[in-house]
Image (cartoon, helix red, strand yellow):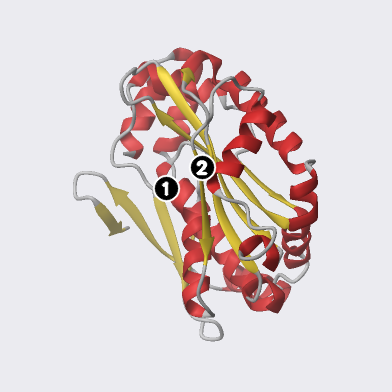
Amino acid sequence: MANEKADHFLSCASTMHDGLRIQKCAMQLRVYPDRAYGTFTDTWYCKHRHCPICQWRKRLKWRSRMHQLLDSTPEALSGKWVALTLTLRNCHVSDLKDTINEMNGAFRRLSNRAFWKANVLGGIKFVEIDQGASDFQSAHPHFHCLIQVRPSMHQGNNYVTEERWAEEWQGCLKAHFIPRVRARRLTGKDDELRHKILKCVSYPMKPRLHAPHRGWFLSMAEQIKDVNLIQPFGQIRGWFSDLKHQEDCELKRHRNDVRLEQKPTTFQWEAFQGSYQKD
């Protein structure tokens, strides 16, 4: 998968640097022994948004951040959650950026509506983009939202049906059609609810088996170059900001000392064998 995407980028002179960057991702591992905290590994990651390895790491990072939030904020795990998917009709891939901008505008209008302000406490909005199933020059952008709501919106007087969500989203899109919307209440306690919340966080970043068609992929990559694909909002955003100040600085300092004092064991990725080999 990484090689497929790298080859797509390498096929075009203007994106060749993107392909080379992905090709070099995680090619070498440096393993440091550490008696205090356990052996740890360093490597260079390209941090390219279309790199499957870095996308996998991003998925783990957001799962980890959500784990931390649920551990450190009791009201988060005891709260009420809804998984909301907002869609619209497919667009041509060359119109993708404008379409996502229109969707973001519609989402802002949705969040300013009275029913939302009264009942939605916060959440995370993920942008996912699929290739059109019947028209391979089309794109299907949609939002996956994990929102925390007041109990009365989850199950009570202020409960919002999928039909109501669709009508509200239609109005915010200013569309002449009723868009497909899915709203699902997350139920359960403790570990069961935690599992469902984490699944909602990781689903929009799910791995793909194969890269899309080259022309479509390159056009899509250009269109979303400056698009923010993940946006926490409301009190969830505040909770995530608090987590950043709770990072373990002692562990970071300790590992920096280990890097200076210890000689690592290095491993090189061998594509032919499909594994890391010791240098």
Q: Is residue 190 left or right of residue 153?
A: left
Q: Amino acid at mark 2?
A: Cys
Find the residue positioned furthest to the front.
157
151 w.r.t. 62: above or below: below
Find the residue positioned furthest to the bottom.
36
Q: Nearer the viewer, residue 136 or 171?
A: 171
How many neighbours does mark 2 have within 10 angstroms: few (below 14), some (14-19), or many (20 or more)? some
Mark pair 1, 2: CA separation: 9 Å
The secondary structure type at the circle numbered 1 is: helix
179 w.r.t. 74: above or below: above
Taking the spot 49% from the left edge, 81% from the top edge, the residue there is 38
Taking the spot 63% from the left edge, 77% from the top edge, the residue there is 71
Q: Is residue 96 left or right of residue 73?
A: left
Q: Is residue 190 left or right of residue 11?
A: right
Q: Is residue 33 in view?
A: no
Q: x, y percentage for residue 176?
A: 58, 19
**For mark 2, what is the residue?**
46
Q: Amino acid at mark 1?
A: Ile
Q: Nearer the viewer, residue 70 or 279?
A: 70
Q: x, y percentage for residue 1?
A: 31, 39
* Quarter where residue 66 is shown: bottom right
C-beta proximity under 8 Å, tags 1 and 2 = yes
Q: Which mark is on residue 276?
A: none
Taking the spot 58% from the left edge, 58% from the top edge, the residue there is 82
**For mark 1, what is the residue?**
53
How many neighbours does mark 1 have within 10 angstroms: few (below 14), some (14-19), or many (20 or more)? many
Labels in figure, total = 2
Q: x, y percentage for residue 92?
A: 47, 15
